Amino acid sequence: MTKLLLICAPVVCVIVGSQALGACKIIQVAELHVNRVSNRPMSDGAINGQKVNILLDTGIYRTFIEGAAARQLHLPLRQYSDQRTYGVGGSVPILTAVVEQLKIDRFTVKDLRLTVLDQGKTKELARLELLLGADFFSRFTTEFDLANGVIHTRETYFPSMPATC
C-alpha cells in the first residue's frame, strides 16, 4: 500500500499542478513607447501633470528624480535621516520627493516616493529628469524591443492566487 501511495502521489500532483498552471494568465501591465537618444531608451512622461523626460535604465538599482527637476515641479522634498550619498564631487544628503502621480503613456502610478539625485546638472544629465530603475522593472516581466521603440511590462496572474504563478 505504501509503495502504491508513493507511486500515485506524484502523478496526482502533476495532474493537479498542470490544471492550475493552465489557469495562469500573462497580462500586459504597460506598453512604454521609447526613443533612443545617444543609444539610451528615453520616454516622455508626466509627474503631477507636468511633462518630464525619462531614462529607462535597468542598470541603476533605484528610481531617481533629478534634484533640479523635483524643485521645478514644486515637489515636497523631505530628509528622513542623516544619511548621505557619496560621489566623485563629494557628498549630499539623501532626499525624498513625494509624487502624487507618475504617468508614462497609459501607465499610471499614484502616491510614489522617489529618491532625489541631487548631484547638480551635468551635460550628461541635461535631458534627464527621471531615471526609472531596476526597482521598477523587477516588479514585472519586462521585454525591451528597442528596434521597434517599445518596452512591454507583463505579470503572471492566477485567478485563485494573487501571487505570481
Image: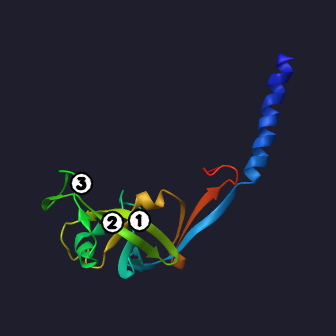
Residue at 37% across / 72% down in the picture? 55
Residue 29 drawn above or below residue 150: above
Give percent across and percent down for residue 115: 30, 61
Give percent across and percent down for residue 4: 86, 22
Q: Amino acid at mark 1?
A: Asp
Sequence order check: which comes first, mark 1 or mark 2?
2
Q: Amino acid at mark 2?
A: Val
**Which numbered marker is on residue 80?**
3
Q: Quadrant of residue 64?
A: bottom left
Between the C-alphas of marks 2 and 3, the distance is: 12 Å
**Which numbered marker is on residue 98?**
2
Give percent across and percent down for residue 95: 23, 60
Residue at 75% across / 54% down in the picture? 23
Sequence order check: which comes first, mark 3 or mark 1?
3
Q: Which residue is mark 1?
A: 111
Q: Amino acid at mark 3?
A: Tyr
